[in-house]
Amino acid sequence: MMPVDRPIIFSEPMIRALLEGRKTQTRRVIKPQPKLFDVAPGVPCEVALEPCDDEPWPRIALGRVIKRQEVRYRTGMRLWVRENWWTSCIHDGDAPRDLPRDAPIWFVTDDGARAWGTQRPSIHMPRWASRMTLTVTDVRVQRLHAISRGDAMEEGCPFPNMASGPNPRDWFGDLWNSIHGADAWKANPFVVAVTFTVERRNVDAQ
């Protein structure tokens, strides 16, 4: 059975990274966070995903097992992207659910875009207005600091991954703090790392 489709929200810089083909991963904080404890002196608790008969999730004998519903993402799942948008000013009084399907839609990240109506936040974008569909190809649970240089590039890093020069992980740490708060990177939470392919089409397009 194909997993259910879900909406997913990205910031404007990450929307641009998706459109430019620079972003094929995202990390989301697991809520609630696992409560870690020492199973023995000097032996920290470890975390694994709950195994399933039809999917070989890794399993660790000691420590807390994260339930599948807490991770929320599955391989094969389709994610339809929500982003900041607007439509014509003649629809300013209409709730998103009441907009006609043929209403003109503009996206804040489009080059040369101008607002002819009231800008609307991504959370209110209806499914039919989404222009990008992501298909999940891999799901991992890890601590935030486990991100590699290559993973940071897949998160949308705008500069090359060179042996010398800026470190993509530092860029990602700054990005994480800008989204989640000044000490968010330092907290090193457990996250779900989702890898996906990107299609520039609506999730319901044939």
Image (cartoon, rainbow, N blue to C red):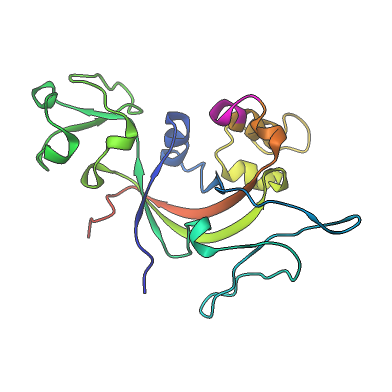
* Number of marks present in the image shown: 0
Residue at screen point 52% across, 57% down = 70
Magenta stretch, overall SS: helix
**57 shown above or below 15:** below
Residue at screen point 51% across, 43% down = 23
**142 shown above or below 149:** below
- Is 38 placed left or right of 88 in the picture? right
**The residue stretch that appears in magenta:** 177-182
* Residue 119 position by quadrant: top left
* Residue 44 position by quadrant: bottom right
**111 shown above or below 193:** above
**Residue 200 spot, x, y in % from top left:** 33, 47
- Residue 26 sits inside the magenta stretch: no
Of 71 and 80, the residue lying toward us: 71
- Residue 179 sits inside the magenta stretch: yes
**Residue 204 spot, x, y in % from top left:** 24, 56
Of 87 and 157, the residue lying toward us: 87
Residue at screen point 58% across, 45% down = 154
Of 118 and 199, the residue lying toward us: 118
- Is 125 placed left or right of 199 in the picture? left
- Location of the C terminus by quadrant is bottom left
Residue at screen point 10% across, 40% down = 102
- Is 65 placed left or right of 37 in the picture? left
**141 shown above or below 27:** below
**Residue 143 spot, x, y in % from top left:** 69, 48
**Residue 201 spot, x, y in % from top left:** 29, 49
